[in-house]
Image (spheres, rainbow, N blue to C red):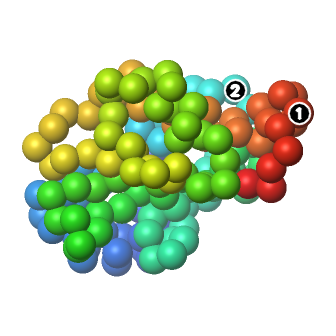
Amino acid sequence: MARAPAVDPCVASVLKTYPCAVRPRILALRELIYETAASTEGVGPLTETLKWGEPAYLTEKSGSGTTIRIAWKAKTPERYGMYFHCQTRLVDTFCGLFPDSFTFEGNRAIVFDRSDPVPIGPLSHCVAMALTYHRRKISLGWETSA
């Protein structure tokens, strides 16, 4: 499996503000995003940047998917999450596919408690769906701008 590249310096500066107990979990999500991108046909390289001050992963070169963000928020210190564009059907789809695997936050996130294990297989499937969202919405005829 391909390893994730070095962390973008701007992203690294944000990660340094996260509690020590959360950083490895966020980095594990980052690694999963890169591994999934490398093993999913048509995704290509990812762009790592900040969106809304949070680490974000874009399929700029291929245009195959929608942005995925990962973050910890001070207002919910025991949780961290993976965030998806709220105007897509992604989180609703994930909820239908994996109702007992995740905790969902509205139509925009999968959130994890710091002490809980992350279900890697189902999460990888969700990441692959996000990274191919634009390609799939065209083939399915979905009308959305996300």
- Look at the image and tell me in which quarter the C terminus lies: bottom right
- 41 is higher (above) or lower (below) than 59: above
Q: Which residue position holds label 2?
A: 41
Q: Residue at x 16, y 49 (%)?
A: 114
Question: Which amino acid is tagged 2?
Answer: Glu
How packed is label 2: few (under 14 Cα within 10 Å), some, or many (20 or more)?
few
Q: Which residue shows up at 36% across the image and 62% down it?
A: 71
Is the residue 123 above or below the residue 5 in the image? above
First reached walking from the N terminus: tag 2 or tag 1 = 2
Q: Nearer the viewer, residue 120 or 109?
A: 109
- Quarter-wise, where is residue 136 in the image? top right
Question: Label for residue 113?
Answer: none
Would you identify the image quadrant in which residue 65 lies? top right
Which amino acid lies under the numbered mark 1 shown in the image of this protein? Gly
Q: Secondary structure at mark 2?
A: loop
| Alpha carbon separation for disc pair 2 and 1 | 20 Å
Of the pair 118 and 110, the residue shown nearer to us? 110
Q: Which mark is residue 141?
A: 1
Marks 2 & 1, CB-CB < 8 Å contact = no
Q: Is residue 43 visible?
A: no
Of marks 2 and 1, the one in the foreground: 1
